[in-house]
Amino acid sequence: MQKAIVLRTLIVSLIMAMISSNSFGQQYKKNAVFWEVTGNGLENPSYVMAILKFIPEANYVLPDAAIDKLKGCKILSTETLLDHHAKHELNKAAHLDHHESLKDYLSKEDFIKLEDLFKERFDIGKLKFEMVYSKFKPVMLSTTMTRLALEGNIKYYEFDLINLANENGLITLGLETVEREVQALEKFPIEDQINSLKHTIENFDQQISDYKEVVKSYTQGDLHTTLEYTLHPVENNRMFKKHFIEQRNEEWLPKMIGYMQQAPTFFAIGASHLADEKGLLSLLEKQGYQLKPVEL
């Protein structure tokens, strides 16, 4: 009888430990845009803030609590450093090679549809479209079209956070070079980019609706739905997700750990890189770090 009681107690303890461990290891699934990272020998907490590359001004919020956490850190880390070199390289990467035009890739009918869309939705005439926008790579043009649809009423978290970091004496670092970001973008085959652009041409209203879902999900802290809708303009292309999101996450992880071990670090990272099993929050948990969503 005594042995049976001991055995039953042991089994219950093991089950409770498994439940507790499983619950602890699934923190990344919770809804939040701001996370505290502790444990694994860190003397002080670091923080991860999910951001969007751009967001309508009406939806932009940078809470005082987040600013206070930033001021308490020694390092601000973004994905890449937005210096003059980075802007030049990204601008170059946004354009087709060898002075090509989308006219070289789209049928005459689709090119005219795109040209008409720019005129009707953005009041951009044929000459400017052909001289400027037709030179963009399809994936970059699709993003640009969403931004144009917001009519300039947009904010950039990275710019504000970098300015705050500079004002408060933080070191600003990147998780990769701009050349690495460009390399990842170029893994998205031009044929797939063209197919995605055709989808945008035919379904631009739906693309704007999807972007509104991105913003809505983000402001609710639902990073997983944010990722889902972020991938809609590229038609959930598996190669894009693998090379532009998942592989970069794996490369960033050791750099994040290195920064945190040196000093308290505030990470401002695209929301799409934080969600799901292969997102950075999950990867940090698997390395033994404790994640706690911070309510702002």
Image: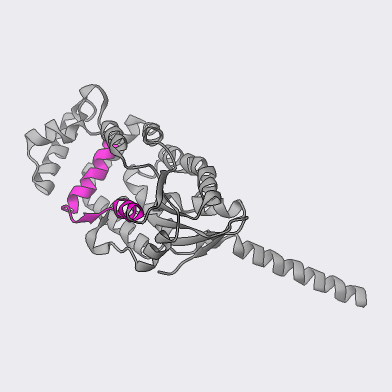
Q: Position of residue 112 (x, y in %)?
A: 13, 35
Residue 212 coordinates in the image, percent (x, y): 28, 58
Question: Quick one: 24 or 204, which is closer to the camera?
Answer: 24
**Magenta segment main secondary structure:** helix
Is 205 magenta? The answer is: no
Query: Dividing the image into 4 quarters, which one contains the N terminus?
Result: bottom right
Q: Position of residue 195 (x, y in %)?
A: 30, 36
Image height of 111 relative to 15, above or below: above
Magenta span of residues: 138-166
Q: Looking at this view, is 17 or 262 the one in front?
A: 262
Res. 198 in view: no
The question of residue 157 being in magenta is answered with: yes
In the rendered image, residue 86, in percent from the top left (x then y), is placed at 32, 37
Q: Please determine whether, in this image, residue 187 is positioned above or below residue 144.
A: above
Is 20 on the left or on the right of 234, as rendered?
right
The residue positioned 25% from the left and 55% from the top of the image is 155
